Each structure stands twice: as C-alpha cells, then as structure tokens.
Amino acid sequence: MTKDQVAAALSNGIGRVEGVTYIVDPADPRLDDYRELNSIAVRAEMETDEYFMGEGYVPIDRMLDSGHRMRSVLLHPKRLKRFVPTMSRPEMAGVPVYVAEQAVLTEVVGFNMYRCCLASAFRAPMPTVAELASTCRRLVVLEALNDDQNVGAIARASRAFGIDGMVISPTCNDPYQRRTVRVSMGEILHIPVARAGAEDWPSALHTLRDAGFETWALTPDVDAVDLWDMNVPDRVAVVLGAEGHGLEAETMDASTHRVRISISANVDSLNVGHAAAVTFAVIGRPATRANYRQPHESSR
C-alpha cells in the first residue's frame, strides 16, 4: 500500500481490512460505475440495460437478497466497519469492495455525498407483459410516472401489501434509478417489472384483461366507483398515473373499472404513492393478513 492508502485504511477506525481496495485517485477506472450520480441523463447513457446502483446498507443488503449479480461496492472509510459482516455473504464472493476518502468520493460522484455507501449490480432481463400476467395475481401499472421517489414508494408499498408484479408504460421512469432503489429500500429489486413498448400502450391493459385481470384505473372523478365498494377479484391490476396529470383518457378507456378513494373534504388529494398504498392495503388485506408481521418482528 502507498502512504496515502495506509492513511485511508487507518481513517476507517478499524485499520486494514482483508479484501478491501483503498483508492486515492479519483480518475481510477475502477470507480467508473459511480461517476456523475446527480445527472439522470448521463447515468441513463452509462448504465443502459447493463447495471444499476444501490445506496445505503439496507438497499444493498436487499440487492444481495434479490439475486442480482453484484459488480462492486464503494464506501467511505467510516462506512466500512458496519459493512464488514456483509462481505462474508456468499453473494459477495469475488465482488471488489473499494474504499475512498471524502474528497475522492466527491470528485467521482459529482457532489458532496456524505459518507457514501454505494454498490452497482447487473440488471436482470425484464419479462414481457404477457409473461408477467401468466405468473402474477396482483399487479400495479404505472403510466408516465416521472418522479423516481414516487416509483420507489409504490414499489415498497407493493411488497408490503402483496402486489407481485409491476407494469410500466414506455414513458415511465427507469424503475432502477438510484433514488428509486433507495426510497424503495431495495424492494423494487424483488418485484418483476415489465415495460410495455410504445406500440403496446395502452393495449397492454387489454393483454392483462385477456389474461383474466380486472384493471382498476385510479382517478379522483366523482363518478368513479368508491374503492371500498369494489369486490376484489382473483386477479387485479391497479393503474396509476403521474402526479397532477393523472391517467390519459385512452388509458382510462382501456381499463375495466374507474376507481376513486374517498378522502376528507378538507384535503385536496393524495400523493400517488399514498393512494397506491391505500389501494394495495384494501385489495391485499384478506390474502395477506396471515402474513403480517407482529410489531417489532424482523422482516427477514
């Protein structure tokens, strides 16, 4: 190790750790996966359909649980001590773990990410809408959602309430953006996602209907059926639109039902993530009650 690398190793509070590479040069090509994290356009061009990023201990742990093959891990020295037990997991065999000081990390990622804890992993192939329909009973369908935090919140609620697949429209955000993975606490990686092609939207909803799904288009329209009055069928897909704009008229027409959530007259509306969670809880309650965790019970 160089003098600078020895200093970096000592700064983590536990000294040198076997299997960790200390990097002092921000131009080191081994850190290329982590560059310009604050630019969605640059990241999309870099990652393509090859890999994605995870941020934080829990999302990275969920990455390992999900079966996505890891590429590398990048840590601030102060993050290493807590990560050491994770390095012994079989999924981490052969995965390089890099550690760099704050100044190096800031130059690499493009902003001052405080004590970063990052990982990159290979993307798995997406199923088709028809393949998803053949293996799932509860789906969420997202049209043109352009807020990665909303997508992450919906993914987390999906996992909590028994939604077992996600269909996204051609213009929906990448479900594996770094913020989406982080906000979902890594749960997006445990939900199969199918992206409909431009030529298959909104006809993808017909594909679901032909596979036996009712498709519930959520809308604030007063003439829609109240969620609490709906009978939950064996197969149902909840269709959600972007904040503000909502669902396109063609998408509403392609859905089997228009459904609204009754809320207090003193409240204008619900965030799409909250609306999703309410709906998922209602449709999933009979099937998932037995699987609910007790207070303070671990999720894994």
Image (cartoon, rainbow, N blue to C red):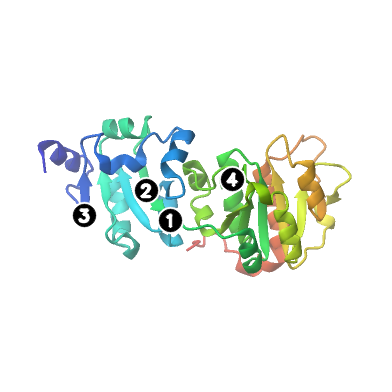
SS for tag 2?
strand
User: In terms of depth relative to the viewer, which is nearer, 264 or 49?
Assistant: 49
Q: Are marks 3 and 4 in contact (CB under 8 Å)?
A: no
Label 2 Cα crowd, 10 Å radius (few <14 / some 14-19 / many 20+): many
Label located before the other in sequence (2 or 3): 3
- Kindly identify the residue that appears in the image at 65 percent across and 46 percent down: 198
User: In terms of depth relative to the viewer, which is nearer, 278 or 32?
Assistant: 32
Q: Are marks 1 and 3 in contact (CB under 8 Å)?
A: no
- Mark 4 lies on residue: 151
Residue 298 vs 154, above or below: the answer is below
Label located before the other in sequence (1 or 2): 1
Residue 90 vs 18, above or below: the answer is below
Q: Are marks 1 and 2 in contact (CB under 8 Å)?
A: yes
Residue 9 pos. (x, y %): 18, 43
Label located before the other in sequence (4 or 1): 1
- Kindly identify the residue that appears in the image at 56 percent across and 46 percent down: 152
Residue 49 pos. (x, y %): 46, 49
Label 3 Cα crowd, 10 Å radius (few <14 / some 14-19 / many 20+): few
- Mark 3 lies on residue: 19
| CA–CA distance in space, label 4 to label 1 | 17 Å
* Quadrant of the rendering where the N terminus is positioned: top left
| CA–CA distance in space, label 1 to label 3 | 20 Å
SS for tag 1?
helix
Residue 63, label in figure:
1
Label located before the other in sequence (2 or 4): 2
Residue 30: image quadrant is: top left
- Mark 2 lies on residue: 119
Name which residue type carries label 4.
Val
Residue 83 pos. (x, y %): 31, 52
